Image (spheres, rainbow, N blue to C red):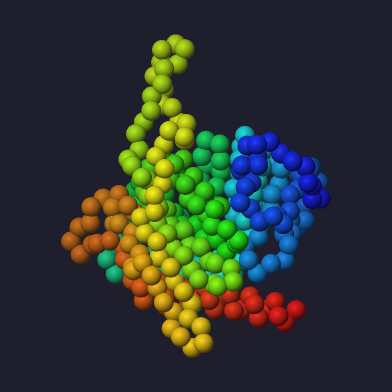
């Protein structure tokens, strides 16, 4: 495959909006080679776009594809996200802390740790960075989703988390975004929930049959439940944090009220700084050291 510069439809442009401007775009051909998918060398998250990608090949190549996938069935456009080292550190350490909290409350065995398992929506197939659900839940959507970004803009993160909540029609109860800022290396963590409860919109067909209208424009927007900013201390100063502890309600993750000895999942300020942010900053330092050594 070779890069292409053709302009797509408005829907395609919308799907690809907020990707870095240097994202390479390829056109799928039968001689498709995975090793040709090389984004520009970067210490940040990278992306590759493949247009006209056949949907029937997605399952066949799923585990062979580099990075995490985001695929539009109607557009036949595949976005592959290549996470950076700081990105992976954020996702891994956040997941480890959630496991620690679950073990402390003895609910570890009640949670399915879904990692970056793919979810197939009506017109989009997507992987989150991490996701969780009750062990005995029904359906394909998780209850809590994490998306991480280490790019130029937080817009794609917010669009992605909105898709999870809205496409699931509220079955995803909470989305978490971790936005690692380039330059300052400050870390912005947000939790997202629907602005109002989801309701089913019913319409009549030509034969007077009632069907659920799944037009996402009718669904409630998201609102920020919490915003936390962690700033890296410079010149020997300690890191600072604004916004307090991050709280994932017990009911949002496990879809039931907490019992005796159970409570919300609380990521304290100390945990956010020393068990998550510190690991992200170490990963950034390693990336920058390797870049200087080249």
Q: Position of residue 92 (x, y in %)?
A: 49, 67
Quadrant into which the C terminus falls: bottom right
Number of callouts:
0
The structure residue drawn at horizontal position 48% and vertical position 50%, both measured from the top left corner, is 161
Given the current orientation, which residue lies at the most extreme left position?
A: 260
The structure residue drawn at horizontal position 68% and vertical position 78%, both measured from the top left corner, is 290
Residue 37 shown left or right of residue 283 in the figure = right
The structure residue drawn at horizontal position 41% and vertical position 12%, both measured from the top left corner, is 208
Residue 262 makes an appearance in the image: yes
Relative vertical location of residue 238 with respect to residue 42 in this rendering, above or below: below
Name the image quarter holding residue 247: bottom left
Residue 63 makes an appearance in the image: no
The structure residue drawn at horizontal position 59% and vertical position 55%, both measured from the top left corner, is 68
Q: Position of residue 47 (x, y in %)?
A: 66, 56
Residue 56 shown left or right of residue 258 in the figure = right
Q: Position of residue 41 (x, y in %)?
A: 72, 66
Relative vertical location of residue 293 with respect to residue 167 in this rendering, above or below: below
Q: Nearer the viewer, residue 75 or 100?
A: 75
Relative vertical location of residue 168 with respect to residue 203 in this rendering, above or below: below
Given the current orientation, which residue lies at the most extreme top position?
A: 207
Q: Nearer the viewer, residue 276 or 237?
A: 237
Q: Position of residue 287 (x, y in %)?
A: 63, 75
Residue 18 shown left or right of residue 255 in the figure = right
């Amino acid at each position: 495959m070779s890069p292409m510069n053709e302009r797509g439809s408005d829907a395609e442009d919308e799907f690809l909006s907020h990707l870095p401007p240097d994202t390479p775009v390829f056109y799928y051909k039968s001689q498709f080679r995975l090793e040709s998918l090389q984004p520009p060398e970067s210490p940040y998250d990278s992306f590759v776009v493949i247009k006209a990608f056949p949907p029937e090949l997605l399952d066949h190549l799923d585990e062979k594809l580099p990075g995490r996938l985001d695929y539009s069935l109607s557009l036949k456009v595949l976005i592959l996200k290549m996470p950076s080292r700081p990105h992976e550190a954020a996702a891994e350490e956040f997941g480890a802390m959630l496991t620690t909290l679950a073990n402390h409350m003895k609910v570890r065995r009640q949670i399915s740790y879904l990692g970056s398992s793919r979810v197939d929506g009506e017109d989009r197939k997507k992987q989150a960075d991490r996701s969780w659900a009750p062990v005995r839940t029904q359906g394909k959507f998780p209850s809590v989703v994490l998306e991480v970004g280490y790019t130029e803009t937080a817009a794609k993160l917010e669009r992605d988390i909105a898709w999870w909540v809205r496409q699931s029609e509220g079955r995803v109860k909470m989305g978490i975004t971790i936005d690692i800022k380039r330059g300052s290396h400050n870390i912005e963590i947000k939790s997202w929930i629907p602005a109002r409860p989801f309701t089913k919109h019913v319409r009549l067909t030509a034969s007077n049959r009632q069907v659920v209208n799944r037009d996402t424009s009718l669904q409630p927007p998201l609102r920020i439940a919490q915003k936390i900013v962690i700033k890296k201390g410079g010149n020997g100063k300690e890191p600072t944090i604004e916004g307090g502890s991050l709280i994932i309600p017990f009911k949002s993750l496990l879809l039931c009220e907490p019992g005796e000895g159970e409570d919300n999942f609380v990521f304290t300020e100390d945990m956010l700084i020393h068990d998550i942010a510190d690991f992200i900053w170490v990963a950034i330092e390693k990336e920058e050291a390797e870049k200087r050594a080249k």
